[in-house]
Image (cartoon, rainbow, N blue to C red):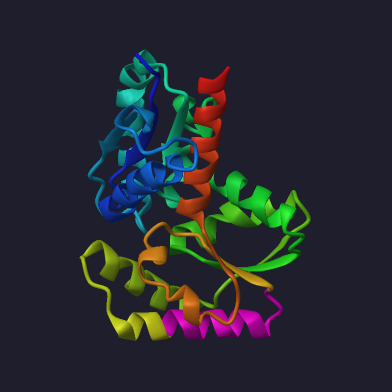
Amino acid sequence: MRKPIVILGGMGPQASLRLHQLLMQESLRYHNGSGDGFPYVVHFSLPVADFISDAAAQKAAAQTLRGLSGTIRALEPTSILLACNTAHLLAEEVALLRRAPFVSMPETVADTLEQRGLQRVGLLATPNTIRSGLYHRVFARRGIATVAPSAPQRRQLEAAIRSVIAGELAPAHQKKLLAIATSLERRGAEAIVLGCTELPLLFPASESPLPAFDCLQLLAEAAISQQYCIMEK
């Protein structure tokens, strides 16, 4: 049997469902739409409460991932994908995520920014992701500066992200996201990184003052490229 791409999702579930869809859509670049041309995907949806800003939820998620380690290794996946940016904070403490074939979303995004020659980008993300400096560190290694939202803007971001998880796509949140993007542009940002996987579901990219990079889309492209390269060998 073909080896799978493994999605570790559920934090929140809308984002991991979208990643699953993006993998299927992206795979069409490599085959003619026949049923057996689509990738084999195993999707684990892990219900973790309040992962956006609660450190206790991160510990619960780490314990869940450690419990899944044996099952995932037995699948011999071609790649393991975390469908949540904040969950990448667990990569250092969960052995499963410290070794190949784990595909890091921040590293994948940094690859794209570096290829585009960008030197200063604005980051929209959860309070935990921004506070941790996760993207700041990855970008800094490529010589890319990160422009982060202010404390009040981070609270607005959190409210917007929670609205998506609750199944709401309120225009009021979209306006606030655009206002934050505009303020980051004034501070010298050349592009916006949507560093929370819920944000592409809400952020009106066509109205953005800056190019917006969708982390899930970039992750799906990287995973499918890797999958079909392996299949061709």
Residue 187 lies in the magenta stretch: yes
Q: Is residue 181 left or right of residue 13?
A: right
Q: Foreground: 67 or 117?
A: 117
Q: Is residue 212 left or right of residue 172?
A: right
Q: Position of residue 22 (x, y in %)?
A: 39, 48
Q: Position of residue 51 (x, y in %)?
A: 33, 53
Q: State the count of labels.
A: 0
The residue positioned 59% from the left and 71% from the top of the image is 211
Dominant secondary structure of the residues highlighted in magenta in the image: helix
Q: Foreground: 188 or 208?
A: 208
Quarter assignment of residue 37: top left
Image quarter in which the C terminus is found: top right
Give the answer, above or below, for where 50 lies relative to 28. Answer: below
Is residue 152 in view?
no
What's drawn in magenta, residue-wise?
176-189
The residue positioned 35% from the left and 80% from the top of the image is 173
Q: Is residue 6 left or right of residue 191?
A: left
Q: Is residue 135 left or right of residue 70?
A: right
